[in-house]
Amino acid sequence: MTRGNPERKQRANGVESRRRILDAAVEISGERGYEGTSIAAVSAKCGLPASSIYWHFKDKDDLIAAVIERSFETWLAAVELPGDEAGTPLERVTAMAANVARSLAATPEFLRLGLMLALERRPKEPQGRTVFLQVRGIAHQRTGDMLRTLFPELDEDAVRTLTTYAIAGADGLFVHQEINADAGDLVEMFELHARLVYDAAARLAARP
Amino acid sequence: MTRGNPERKQRANGVESRRRILDAAVEISGERGYEGTSIAAVSAKCGLPASSIYWHFKDKDDLIAAVIERSFETWLAAVELPGDEAGTPLERVTAMAANVARSLAATPEFLRLGLMLALERRPKEPQGRTVFLQVRGIAHQRTGDMLRTLFPELDEDAVRTLTTYAIAGADGLFVHQEINADAGDLVEMFELHARLVYDAAARLAARP
Amino acid sequence: MTRGNPERKQRANGVESRRRILDAAVEISGERGYEGTSIAAVSAKCGLPASSIYWHFKDKDDLIAAVIERSFETWLAAVELPGDEAGTPLERVTAMAANVARSLAATPEFLRLGLMLALERRPKEPQGRTVFLQVRGIAHQRTGDMLRTLFPELDEDAVRTLTTYAIAGADGLFVHQEINADAGDLVEMFELHARLVYDAAARLAARP
Amino acid sequence: MTRGNPERKQRANGVESRRRILDAAVEISGERGYEGTSIAAVSAKCGLPASSIYWHFKDKDDLIAAVIERSFETWLAAVELPGDEAGTPLERVTAMAANVARSLAATPEFLRLGLMLALERRPKEPQGRTVFLQVRGIAHQRTGDMLRTLFPELDEDAVRTLTTYAIAGADGLFVHQEINADAGDLVEMFELHARLVYDAAARLAARP
DNA sequence: TATGAATGAGACTTCATTCAT
DNA sequence: AATGAATGAAGTCTCATTCAT
């Protein structure tokens, strides 16, 4: 019988280790931000020695960037559950907003860390911040596309303004919920937000 | 004027030193957050040795709390410039929003640091976070009062929802401007926000 | 009416301040030893600023030396309560031992700090250590004198040995009581010790 | 022999490093006590950087506790050299006392540091103190056992008293020798002590 | 007779990272 | 695919002490 060492740790599995490290890092950096995330803390939480983290990631900056990337994917997977595509345009928009709200409540780490990175002004900008801003750019793009599809009459200036407003509102409502742990329903607030933006767009589209 | 010895130690002046320390700390912590603010950096920026900082503040936590307090006062002073009290209610509300936007653009450190503190989840909550949330509570209160004055028909639930939405929008727009250094006019966006909230309130007040 | 400042602090009184400082320093240094006694801690306990301590004492070393001196006097005052001089020689010796035991239990700071200082080997010997050893030399001397008086036949070698043994026993029993807060009666142990030393001396005196 | 690069970093050897750290720490803490032992001093004496000390020991408290443990073992090894088991009971007891005296003279660090720790009253009791008191409890136990074996007639009260007295005397004599570097023979004093305790026990055993 | 303010040195500890195995 | 051991730099904070008032 092959004995190996009796304490677990079966044949080393790189993918699994990487996952464990990221799991730990997502949790910690989502709570403490960039500087607050120490390699030692990640090591302690995932059970792998610090040097192993450096086998999987070039440095702390690289790790945080990977965290942003992976937590974005996790969050995206939560958002893009199909959702019913039926109903009036307003209903569809509202349903989508509710979907985003639910996903943010379920996996807040992505946006929490992202906003912390975004607010900081560090001499050497962390990769993770760049990644976050890119990813956020996609959300911007999609929101803009949706507005253009729903209200083709809107000029580009109006689209840009409304898009910015839409995303800013989402960020702000997210922050509110993070601050007031007991906050009312995030979903309801997102729905209200969607309605207000929709109305504003409709009005602007009717009368430039 | 008696200058005394040119190398340091001019007749000790606690108030002035405290101010220098806070000036440096506001700037640094507004850019780097709690963990990113090192006493050594503050010391370097204000010219006083680290040990002197500890004469004026019990510890780093105490310093950051003082930073929040003072930067709030600075910001408040910028907001509360009288502002024209004339015009329709909507005009007055819009003017106030513009005022807030201008003050946030002029002295963003308060809200930048405050939001970073608010987003973090540190095992031992920093005093500064508590202070920020208190101060923020005041803004909430005042916004609610304004809504109640303008639309006495609104029930408390509606007031609460609209207040939350109003402040969340402000936070979100602020974040947007912080992220896009080149962002369009913060004032315009705040005015738009004010209008949308006003309209929503008006509609809710008309038909519960 | 002379008002002065309303908060106490009547006309500064040097003697009283010095006493407060020493009171605090005796307590702290009796618990923490030389290095463990910080000027800041003494300042906090006595309520006077650190700089005031330096007005009364040249430096920390000087303060600790003064502590030893004063706590010795305090202790001596407790020991030298007359005590009944009647009875057999053994009874008188035993009574004196009991007296010492009682005083050590009542004001242990002197010997506690003294022993800590005595055990340390610091590059620059603290004044306080020197003072303690001197004072201790007196106890040695007196104990020797008492033995010589009681047993004139003892040669100097025997006196020296018995004296050393007597004092070492006292030190050891004191340490025992300090370690076992709940220890039995220190007085009883001192009486036993006195008896054993007395017997030993008697035997040695009878048969060199 | 492959020597590799002459500047540091020869194939890492944890056990050896740990030993070097402890060697340095035993020496320093045996001379200066808990507070007097600075990590920087240990680092300088053992040649490893301070941060390396923290690889091997959680913190200073942990290091001092390890010092007590290891110096106890060192001392025990010195005591337990067999020693001639022949002769009368008194001779055997005396021989053992001499053995203890010799080992204390040879490796005094254990008891020196231990007594310093024992005398201090620190708000948060150092682990090392706890360890010392435990280890000391063993000595107490063994001494008691020996008395019970030699004088089965002694009641438990008498055993307890004599044991305490025996150990207190040993502590006191040790302190005496530490204070008077030039002190006479520690061995002789321990032998005398052993004899006196033996006699006292014999007398108590004969007539309760 | 004090004391508010300051200060350089040094305390303990954690940091991100490296490297030989 | 890892990891035990190490390390210099930097972290927060306390130290004993000074000095102008």
Image (cartoon, coloured by chain):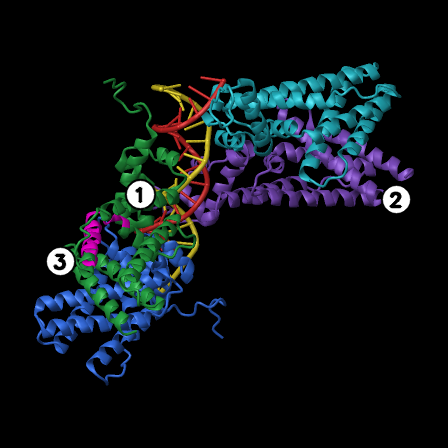
Chain colours: A blue, B green, C cyan, D purple, E red, F yellow
Disc 3 residue crowd, few under 14, some 14–19, many 20+, Cα 10 Å: few
Task: State how far apart marks 3 and 2 are (Cα).
Answer: 99 Å
In this rendering, the label closer to the viewer, 1 or 2 = 1
Mark 1 falls within which chain?
Answer: B
Q: Under tag 2, what secondary structure?
A: loop
Instruction: Give left or right: position of C133 versus C84.
Output: left
Q: Is residue A74 visible?
A: no
Residue D197, above or below C20: below
Residue at image point 83% right, 14% down? C152
Task: State how far apart marks 3 and 1 are (Cα).
Answer: 28 Å
Indicate the amino acid at tag 1: Arg
Residue B95 % position (x, y)? 18, 55
Residue under label 2:
D153
Find residue B18 and name its label: none
Indicate the amino acid at tag 3: Gly
Instruction: Of the two numbered discs 3 and 1 on the same chain, state the one appearing first in sequence.
Output: 1
Residue B91 % position (x, y)? 17, 59
Task: State how far apart marks 1 and 2 are (Cα).
Answer: 79 Å
Hey, which quadrant is residue A134 in on the image? bottom left
Instruction: Give left or right: position of C91 versus E5.
Output: right
Residue D170 % position (x, y)? 71, 33
Mark 2 falls within which chain?
Answer: D
Looking at the image, the residue that sits furthest to the right is D207
Residue at image point 74% right, 44% down? D142
Find residue B70 and name its label: 1
